[in-house]
Amino acid sequence: MPRVQRLDPLVAERIAAGEVVERPASAVKELVENSLDAGARQITVELVGGGISLLRVIDDGCGMSAEDVKLGLERFATSKITQWEDLDSLSTLGFRGEALPSIAAVSRLEIATCERGADFGTRVKVEGGVIAEEGPAPPQSGTRVTVEDLFFNTPARLKFLKSAAAETSQVVDLLTRMALTQPEVHFQVRSNQREVFLVTSKMTLPQRMAQLWKVPLEDLVEVEGEVQGVQVRGWVAKPHHARPTRNHQLFCLNGRIIKSTSLSQAVLEGFTPLVSKGRYPVALLRLDIDPSLIDVNVHPTKAEVRFAEARSPFRAIYRSIARSLEEHSADSVQPQHWDLIEEAPFLPEAQPEPLAREPVAPAYSAPARAAASSHRPLPPYRPTPPPLASTLELFKPLEIAPEGPRVKVLSQLYRTFIVAQVDGEMWIVDQHTAHERIWYERLGHLQPLDGPQQGLLVPEIMEFSLAHAALLEGSLEQIREFGFEIEHFGGNTFQMRSLPLGVKPGRAAGIVRELVEQIASEQVSLRNHPQEVVREKLRAMVSCKAAIKAGDPLSVDEMESLIREMLTVEHSNYCPHGRPTRIKLDDRALERLFHR
């Protein structure tokens, strides 16, 4: 067995740096926190290539002396604490003394800094943890840290980074959160010489939330409360702004951004029952707690904390949100959503001659419904307008031989399930999963950039949050394969020029937004996965988002068309996520159910 030896200091520093600097966003977080601890009120962050090629943080803080710069490049050197007991009254964001040396160990780093009132500043260049050059700098107050070629000397770490667009999205998301927790600080963010966002110190916190998270100012509800010494302050969006992921929930503990599944669950409990399953409220909450009652020294990233009494923060958030929503009479449905429930009369278009057609009887006759009045009554069958007819024209159905299955639609139950007879068998079809499988199978036969499209006479303009805009910009080629032709329109705005054949124009923007939300939650990486894996993920997402939804009313013709189309595709028994599309009940199954 090899003898125990001391590691070379440079090797040890690179290993240790991996705990603190995982990606460009990690380096930006540490540098911006240093700027905030230095009292900065103006911070500019510049990125090139997602921060992999270059990232720069410029602040107007107190600056450093030449001696402080050299000492700050050594591990475990810090100005934040002097002894262990200082952690019980910690008021700064940093305290471990690992950020600068960790970043310097895996990059080419330059620091230019000057103390306020000094005649000249200091400039130091470090390459792979070794000081390569030092000298004077102009007497400009504040600090400028430039990081180039991140992970140039650790190729294993570089290999696991995502695409430049994905890394940019991570940094923008981080800086968005920091800008929301530091409303008194002016933030400017630039990527590849283009301004991503700018928030000034004159903006209120709700104004920042409205700009960065795209929530109307009038739909934000202020939250405030206290439970057992835990103070909660912040803002939540009304229930109908709930998102499919937790990406728009932010917790700030004594000024420090933290992650906590327990606090996220407390937010959800506060909104119950106003938010449906699978949706997550938008919330920005600041908690103020006695520092001696928390442990921030859990992980080098300082994103996780431990509470001496975990129930108090949970109760404070839950009760404060529930009380605020009740005071504002918040509802879970916007008024315009109710028009989906109203059944407008449907008059078929005039025909030259009446078509001979076998009448379709309702699932239950009026006498049968009257006799079953003691049970849950089913609504009478009434024809409804076919708002989704174009959706079912996604592709021309394959020709079915005359001796093919006979399909007779009987009814639509709860606007979700289709009851039909198919060759003498009773079928109960889930309209969403069935249509999702149709989309999925048909998209699988398309060649790249060959998806059937329908052009829009007037392009639809869509605006996204900062992080989602960066992610969408890096995924446009892959999304275009399935028929969504989207172009960057400046800033965080995009325009849709065409969409897949069969998708209603009024629904297309919502589909794209949900698609981007899901990509963000799964962090689909164009670099880490083979192209076919990414394409399959997007294929499944588009299929789910574009399919008919549970609750969509369908006409008899639409239901019949859906079942016939389902019979032409492969693997039609299950949707891409493994859920069944239909249940069959033949005469033997019915006999068993009735113990015959």
Image (cartoon, grey):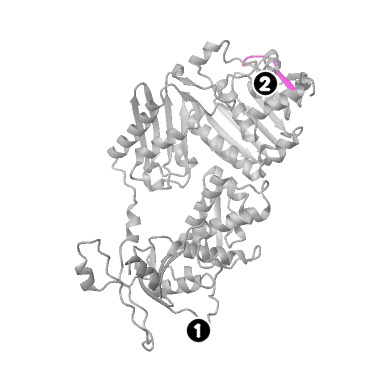
Look at mark 2 in the image and give the residue it sits on: 113
Amino acid at dot 2 = Thr
491 above or below 204?
below
**Spot occupied by residue 434 in the image (x, y as percentages of width and height):** 47, 65
Residue 59 inside the magenta-drawn segment = no
Residue 120 inside the magenta-drawn segment = yes
Q: Furthest residue to the bottom?
A: 353
Magenta-colored span: 116-124
**Spot occupied by residue 253 in the image (x, y as percentages of width and height):** 46, 26
Q: Where on the picture, by quarter, is residue 523?
A: top right
Residue at (53, 45) in percent of width and height? 521
> Gap between marks 2 and 1, in whole Å?
83 Å
Specify whether residue 457 is in view: no
Residue 166 in the figure: left or right of residue 422:
right
**Spot occupied by residue 576 in the image (x, y as percentages of width and height):** 53, 59
Q: Give whichever of 93, 35 is nearer the camera.
A: 93
Q: Secondary structure at mark 1?
A: loop
Q: Residues within 10 Å of mark 2 (few under 14, many from 20)?
A: many
Q: Give whichever of 404, 390 is nearer the camera.
A: 404
Q: Give whichever of 424, 487 is nearer the camera.
A: 424
**Spot occupied by residue 438 in the image (x, y as percentages of width and height):** 52, 66
Look at mark 1 in the image and give the residue it sits on: 403
Q: Earlier in the sequence, mark 2 or mark 1?
A: 2
Q: Give whichever of 22, 568 is nearer the camera.
A: 568
In what quadrant of the picture does the N terminus appear?
A: top right
Disc number lying in front (2 or 1): 1
Amino acid at dot 1 = Glu
Indicate which disc residue 190 carries. Answer: none
Q: Secondary structure at mark 2?
A: strand
Q: Residues within 10 Å of mark 1 (few under 14, many from 20)?
A: few
